[in-house]
Amino acid sequence: MEVDSLFFESFPSSETDQISGEAEVTIDKLGSKMDCIVRFNGAATLPCDRCLGNIQIPLSFDERLVVQLGESTNTEEEIWTLGPECHELDLSQPIFEWMHLHLPSRRLHTSEDQCDPAMTAYLNGGGKPSSDPDGSSDDGGTDENDGIDPRWNALKDLK
Ligand SMILES: [Zn+2]
């Protein structure tokens, strides 16, 4: 099964649609159960946490899903049950979830040299390092140098 941006059209809330690759599904029949082994090999394109430039991150995983036949369909449990009305096994939802599960939480260019030079120069020259990976900081403008927001102090008291 091919995964590309078309695949993500069924998942509008996805963090990214920049994952492509191939999912190989092997189904082993074990008595009344089926063992679906999904092997994914591909790559995700995500913004670098440091410079926001795109990086290609290899993404591959092996996952499995056990499916059994039963009286009624239930895909909420760890083991899926397919009712008699089910003639198709749609694995796109679990594959979608697995892909996100296996995305690294830190996404960085392997070395700073590969980062966007303009952004690196800005970060290095801008005094204190930026602490917002969203990159919402802009040059100039107001800075939060007025000490700690009093609401944080209030929160500390709650501990
Ligand atoms: Zn970077």
Image: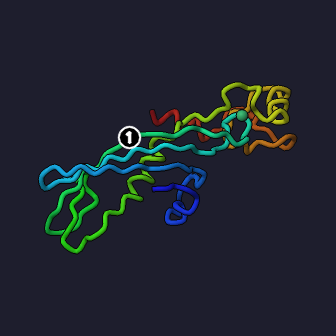
Q: Quadrant for residue 48, please give it.
A: top right
Of 86 and 159, nearer the camera is 86
Q: Position of residue 64 (x, y in %)?
A: 31, 45
Q: Residue at x 76, y 42 (%)?
A: 137
Q: Give the quarter the ligand 1 occupies.
A: top right
Q: Residue at x 28, y 51 (%)?
A: 27
Q: How is the image coloured?
A: rainbow
Q: Is residue 44 above or below residue 1?
A: above
Secondary structure at numbered mark 1: strand
Q: Residue at x 75, y 30 (%)?
A: 114
In this rendering, would 158 be left or right of 134? Answer: left
Q: Position of residue 40 (x, y in %)?
A: 44, 45
Q: Is residue 156 above or below residue 92?
A: above
Q: Is residue 96 above or below residue 112?
A: below
Instruction: Please give the residue where the numbered disc 1 appears in the rendered image.
Output: 62
Which quadrant, please, contains the N terminus? Answer: bottom left
Of 134 and 105, nearer the camera is 105
In this rendering, would 64 be left or right of 107? Answer: left
Q: Position of residue 69 (x, y in %)?
A: 17, 62
Q: Residue at x 23, y 55 (%)?
A: 67
Residue type indicated by callout 1: Asp
In this rendering, would 47 be left or right of 101? Answer: right
Callout count: 1
